[in-house]
Amino acid sequence: MDSITARNLLKLQEIDEKIEEVKSRLEKIPTEIKHLQEEKQKVIDEYEKILIQKKQLELTKKEKELDIQDLQQRIKKIEDRLNTVKSNDEYKALLREKAQAEESIIHLEDEIINIMEEIENISKKIKEFEKERDKKIQEIENQIESKQKEIEELNNQIQNLTKEREELIKHLKPQDIAQYENIKKKVKTKVIAVVDDQVCTGCYMVIPPKVFTELLKTENLLRCPNCGRYLFYESK
């Protein structure tokens, strides 16, 4: 294999490594976008949760106000009956019932005051949260948009690299490409390993002296006896 072929194969490997790097990045982005979408939904859910809390408090307040109305109506009926009873015991019983109803109203009114304070506090919290929510959601949406643009850019890179690869292959013999692809299937990473200080940078084993001596005499590609990768040595 001549030095021109060797350098073309090195260039082919460089392109393939770039393609794999871009593909690897492309595989990660959908997961990153999914996490951002989950984070966005979490912010929305948290806001909805606070709104539900406020609504529940308002419903509780309404229920207690209706309870007070019921008690007030009961007191009115008791007062009407007080004017008609003839028995002293019945009169006292109605007074006790009226007093219990009035006491219940006082407790309910205290509870309503507490609920109103909670509603006021949660309303402030909602107002503050809305500002943070909108800001946070916008930040997340910007990140998602950025990653979607990155996907487009990476796909364009793959297209350009693929075209460059196709052009380069035209200058290589079919048997050289076949051998390159065959080694690539076996070693997965580097097909051509540059020799550095008598060491194969593919398997990091020392090159036998005989092979290394032969490499010094030529720019051609030889095979590493340890991992089978092509070896390329360029004098410094």
Image (cartoon, rainbow, N blue to C red):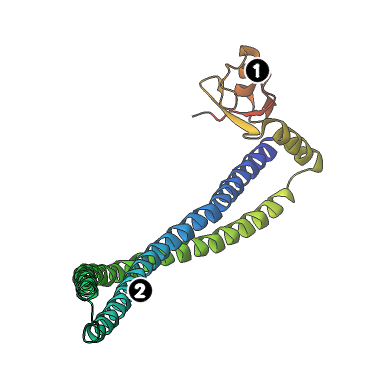
Label 2 belongs to which residue?
59
Residue 145: x and y, percent?
A: 47, 66
Q: How many marks?
A: 2
Badge number at residue 211: 1
- Compute the Cα span from label 1 to label 2: 86 Å
Q: Nearer the viewer, residue 186 or 216?
A: 186
The answer to whether 10 appears left or right of 82 in the picture is right
Seen in the picture, residue 36 relative to 92 is either above or below; the reply is above
Element type where label 2 sits in the image: helix
Badge 1 vs badge 2, beta-carbon distance below 8 Å: no
Q: Quadrant of residue 2?
A: top right
How many residues crowd mark 2 within 10 Å: few (<14), some (14–19), many (20+)?
few
Seen in the picture, residue 200 relative to 151 is either above or below; the reply is above
Along the polypeptide, which appears first: circle 1 or circle 2? 2
Amino acid type at image mark 2: Leu
Q: Quadrant of residue 154?
A: bottom right
How many residues crowd mark 1 within 10 Å: few (<14), some (14–19), many (20+)?
some
Q: Nearer the viewer, residue 196 or 229?
A: 229
Element type where label 1 sits in the image: helix
Residue 233: x and y, percent?
A: 58, 28
Amino acid type at image mark 1: Val
